Image (cartoon, rainbow, N blue to C red):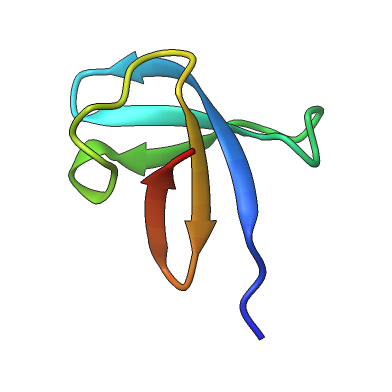
Amino acid sequence: MFERIEYTVERIDGDYAYLKNMAEPDEELKCVARALLPEEISEGSRLSYEMFQYSLI
């Protein structure tokens, strides 16, 4: 089964966004290309990752 992971967009830097895993807040930020994320994200947005797809919460 695919696990659902929730993230918060901590920082946007050019073509990349840095995401914090809400279940593991002490974990290193995950760097993701903005092309893989919903266009309307901004710093502080909450995202869900499930079945290889990111969506806004």
**Split into 4 quadrants, where in the image is the N terminus?**
bottom right
24 relative to 10 in the view: left or right: right
Residue at x 81% of width, y 28% of height: 26
47 relative to 54 in the view: left or right: right
Residue at x 25% of width, y 41% of height: 38
The x and y percentages for residue 34 are: 24, 37
Residue at x 79% of width, y 41% of height: 23
Residue 14 lies in quadrant? top left
Question: Relative to the observer, which residue lies in front, 12 or 56?
Answer: 56
Q: Is residue 13 above or below residue 3?
A: above
Q: Is residue 45 above or below residue 39?
A: above
Residue at x 29% of width, y 17% of height: 13
The x and y percentages for residue 36 are: 26, 50
Q: Is residue 48 above or below residue 20?
A: below
The x and y percentages for residue 56 are: 41, 39
Residue 20 lies in quadrant? top right
- Name, please, the residue furthest toward the bottom: 1
Q: Could you tell me how many numbered marks the image carries?
A: 0
